Image (cartoon, rainbow, N blue to C red):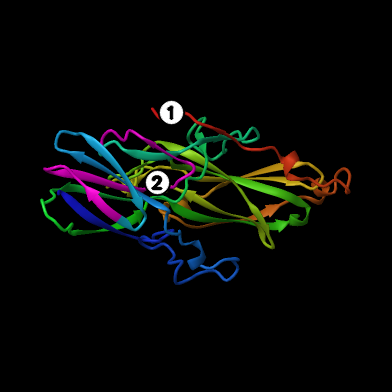
């Protein structure tokens, strides 16, 4: 048989530190309600392998996350590995290892009309992606043997997490609900290289209320077109939005330019904005007995749009 015993391990990292950026593993803020280790992604439920032979013919194999026996045909193969238990990930152009990529479902929010700091007009809005691992082997030629040899594969993260902190200076007591948007991020990632696409998108998400303000842990493919040799000269703009609904039903929006913070953290990290104020006039306006609940907040709407 032409077969191999795949043995997969997982690099459970939620962010990478580059250059002069803060090493969050060593300098974790005590003010956050979770630890660095709490954010590490888990082991997926299953592993998928796409094999491409010398003629370009493709075969798909699903196996447990830890691996298993992979049967191959004679000759050289390119092997693409990724976890197959995602909910929001959309895989596209899998007919070739060179074009295979992952994105996530489009998502709309009627009250979000874009960010005043964003350079992209009508930027696509989407769900945060699920955790995704991947690996790629450019060339593997199996031997015809009785006992399958071991193939050790390390699965690397292709989705990263941003801990986003919105710090209030005044008026947090008036806030009932909060949600946000992170603009300028990568729309997709190529499975064979881990490089993100040049296309940009805005990630929409809900927030929790904390004693200092609002917070969200947001998954993303990272910044667009990264890594590449021109990254240092990139003119990309990254921007945050915060939308809050007050207990009296009033909605307020805040936009922030976070280009410097995100540029230093292309694959996850902590983003903080501060000085947010809700005026007493807004907070005390109308009936003080009116409490906003989720039903009155308005739901996100998921829309599946084929990739171009």
23 relative to 62, above or below: below
Q: Is residue 293 left or right of residue 201?
A: right
Which image quarter holds the C terminus?
top left
* Residue at 49 percent of width and 50 percent of height: 219
Image mark for residue 306: 1
Describe the element under mark 1 as helix, strand or loop: loop
Residue 191 sits inside the magenta stretch: no
Q: Quadrant of residue 90?
A: top left
User: Which disc is residue 129 wearing?
Assistant: none
Residue 220 in the image, given as x and y percentages of width and height: 46, 48
Q: Residues within 10 Å of mark 1 (few under 14, many from 20)?
A: few
Q: Residue at 44% of width from left, 72% of height from top? A: 26
Q: Nearer the viewer, residue 49 or 102?
A: 49
Measured as percent of width and height from the top left, residue 307 is found at 41, 30
Residue at x-position 70% and y-position 58%: 169
Instruction: Tell me: residue 149, above or below residue 86.
Output: below
Which region of the structure is painted magenta?
A: 68-96
Horizontal arrangement in the rendering, residue 216 relative to residue 194 (left or right): right
1 and 2 marks in contact (CB < 8 Å): no
6 versus 194 height, above or below: below
Q: CA distance from mark 1 to mark 2?
A: 19 Å
Please state the horizontal and vertical placement of residue 87, each as a whole percent of the image.
49, 43
**Mark 2 = which residue?**
84
Residue 35 in sight in this render = yes
**Mark 2: secondary structure:** loop
Q: Is 77 contained in the magenta span?
A: yes
Q: Residue at x 14, y 37 (%)?
A: 54
Q: Percent x, y for residue 275? A: 65, 56
8 and 108: which is toward the camera: 8
Of the image marks 1 and 2, the number of the one nearer the N terminus? 2
- The residue at the far front in this view is 146
Instruction: Look at the image and tell me whether residue 194 can be seen.
Output: no
């Amino acid at each position: 048989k032409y077969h191999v015993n795949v043995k997969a391990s997982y690099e459970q990292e939620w962010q990478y530190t580059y250059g002069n950026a803060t090493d969050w593993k060593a300098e974790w803020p005590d003010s956050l309600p979770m630890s660095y280790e709490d954010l590490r992604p888990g082991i997926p439920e299953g592993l998928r392998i796409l094999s491409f032979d010398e003629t370009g013919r493709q075969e798909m194999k699903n196996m447990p996350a830890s691996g298993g026996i992979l049967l191959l045909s004679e000759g050289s193969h390119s092997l693409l590995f990724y976890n197959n238990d995602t909910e929001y990930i959309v895989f596209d152009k899998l007919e070739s290892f060179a074009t295979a990529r992952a994105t996530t479902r489009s998502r709309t929010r009627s009250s979000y009309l874009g960010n005043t700091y964003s350079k992209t007009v009508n930027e696509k809005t989407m769900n945060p992606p699920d955790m995704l691992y991947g690996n790629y082997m450019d060339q593997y030629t199996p031997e015809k043997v009785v006992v399958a040899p071991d193939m050790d594969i390390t699965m690397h993260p292709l989705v990263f997490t941003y801990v986003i902190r919105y710090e209030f200076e005044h008026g947090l007591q008036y806030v009932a609900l909060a949600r946000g948007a992170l603009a300028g991020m990568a729309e997709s990632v190529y499975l064979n290289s881990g490089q993100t696409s040049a296309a940009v998108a805005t990630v929409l998400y809900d927030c929790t209320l904390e004693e200092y303000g609002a917070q969200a842990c947001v998954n993303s493919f990272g910044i667009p077109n990264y890594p590449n040799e021109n990254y240092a000269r990139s003119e990309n703009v990254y921007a945050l939005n915060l939308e809050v609904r007050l207990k009296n039903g009033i909605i307020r929006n805040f936009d922030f330019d976070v280009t410097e913070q995100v540029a230093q953290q292309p694959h996850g990290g902590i983003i903080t904005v501060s000085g947010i104020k809700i005026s007493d006039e807004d907070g005390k306006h109308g009936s003080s007995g009116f409490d906003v609940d989720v039903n009155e907040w308005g739901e996100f709407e998921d829309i599946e749009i084929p990739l171009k």
